[in-house]
Image (cartoon, rainbow, N blue to C red):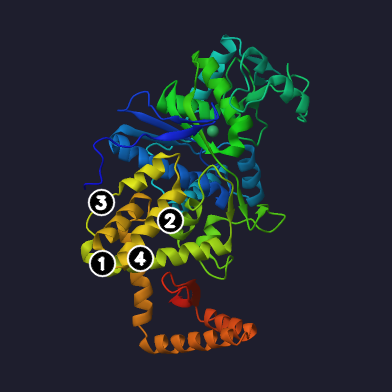
Amino acid sequence: MDRFPADKPTLRLTNTLSRQKEDFVPEDPANVRMYVCGPTVYDYAHIGNARPVVVFDVLYRLLRHLYGAEHVKYVRNITDVDDKINARAAAEGISIRELTEKTAAQFHADMRALGALDPDIEPRATEHIGEMKELIETLVEKGHAYVAEDHVLFDVGSMEDYGKLSGRSLEDMQAGARVEVAPYKKGPMDFVLWKPSAGNEPGWPSPCSIERSGRPGWHIECSAMAGKHLGKTFDIHGGGVDLVFPHHENEVAQSRCSHDAPLMAHYWLHNGFLQVEGEKMSKSLGNFVTVHELLETQKIGGRAWDGRTIRLVLLMTQYRQPLDFTEKSLQEADRLLDRWAELIAANESECGPANDLPVEVVEALCDDLNTPRAIAALHGFAREGRQGDALAVRRLAASLAFLGFETEAMLTRAAKGEEAKQADPELAIRVEGRIADRLAARAARNWAEADRIRDELAGEGIVLKDYKDGDTGEIRTSWEVKR
Ligand SMILES: [Zn+2]
């Protein structure tokens, strides 16, 4: 408890708007508001979709710690009207509603498995069509949007500093634009707020006296939902760096111009790109990985992975940096969590409620969510804990819980490993024997035999993990039974 400073450390965040690390000062500390763009629900979330969910979950937890849980409001939407949804529903021969319900439920299950808290409010686009139409009509009235051939378009030329968030001038954008210019657009960068729907597409009665029914563009959905639930101006808007332009730029344009506000959000946060095994993830490269596949199938590394293991991989890189998601990083995170779990389980009677949150962990997170620095602190606690310092183990458990690795989940993890070994003592003797054989093969540089033994055990669901002993530097092998 002595590690709690009287006043908490200052939170500093890199703001895409200023391109600088700034002190975070909320408009109202009693009502700290954050909006993060949520999923378009037509397919399983891939690991790149999971990154912002986990990153902003850590920020959400930190804000709750700094301001009090009841003073933080986190909104993350569900986009359930989108042309990709229409196409997928048609391809699967199911209704749009069926597809969006199924996908949203899967998204929730996957993100909970990663230890992400639910946001306070999770608005759905289809439940905010009225708010979108109101925004659109206001923009037309104020001269920022116009009707053309049953579409409503935002007139980017009507906004003096369009492009400020992404740091592009309108001239540059137009010069570089390869967008096909629809003849009814006034300017090539003007974007759709509302568009007409054909017979089989979802449609609602249109705004601005347009007779044909229609549906909203993607950008207006977030402006409407953020405005309704967080107000005209709020504190933090987050998402992946791929959303800065055009999505976030256009959200800013819509919200500011309709509300006559100098800002939509004070702080814009963007997480970096994610690659898989050093390459851009794509279905054509065959390295496309969904969270569902990691959790439920043997696609990566021949085994299913625990959600907290995936979470740790996502936090081992600071959120603004590009992240390379690899099988090796999964194995490393898995082994780390196992060792921490064993340590916590061995000191279970010592691990009381999480009231020993160490200041170095909070400080690391307050420094632009420096999760690698926080994890380095955990290594330190674990080292002290292994040397018999029970308080260090409590700090480890409290820090992990704060980062979304609840003590209960850690104990379950440790118990599973132990149970599997104890349930079959003969198995333990046999596996240890085979591990010794494998070490001998490796010592003789007989790599083929060593690999054969590993694969033979993997065939029985026994996973071997090599690690360097922190004290002696020797290579050791731990094992566990997976499902
Ligand atoms: Zn959005």
The mark that comes first in sequence, 4 or 2, is: 2
Residue at mark 3: 356
**For the residue marked with disc 3, what is the amino acid?**
Asp
Percent position of residue 244, x then y: 59, 33
What is the CA distance from the residue labelled 4 to the residue labelled 2? 17 Å
Q: Which amino acid does label 2 sit on?
A: Ala
Quadrant location of the C terminus in the rendered image: bottom left
Task: Tell me where residue 443 sits by quadrant.
Answer: bottom right
Disc 3 is placed on an element classified as loop
Q: What x and y, as percent, mark residue 257?
A: 55, 15
Q: Say what amino acid the circle numbered 1 marks.
A: Asn
Q: Closer to the camera: disc 3 or disc 4?
A: 3
- The residue singled out by tag 1 in the image is 347
Of the two numbered discs 4 and 2 in the rendering, the one whose residue sits closer to the viewer: 4
Mark 2 and mark 3: Cα distance apart in space? 25 Å
Tell me which numbered mark, 3 or 1, is placed earlier along the sequence.
1
Question: In terms of secondary structure, where does tag 1 sit?
Answer: loop
Residue marked by disc 2: 113
Task: Please say if 278 is above or below 150.
Answer: below
Q: What residue type is labelled 4?
A: Ala
Alpha carbon separation for disc pair 4 and 1: 10 Å
Few, some or many residues within 10 Å of mark 4 (<14, 14–19, 20+) = many
For marks 2 and 3, the one nearer the N-term is 2
Q: How far apart are marks 1 and 2 (CA)?
A: 25 Å
Q: Does the closest atom of ligand 1 sit within 8 Å of the Cβ of label 1?
A: no
* Residue denoted by label 4: 341
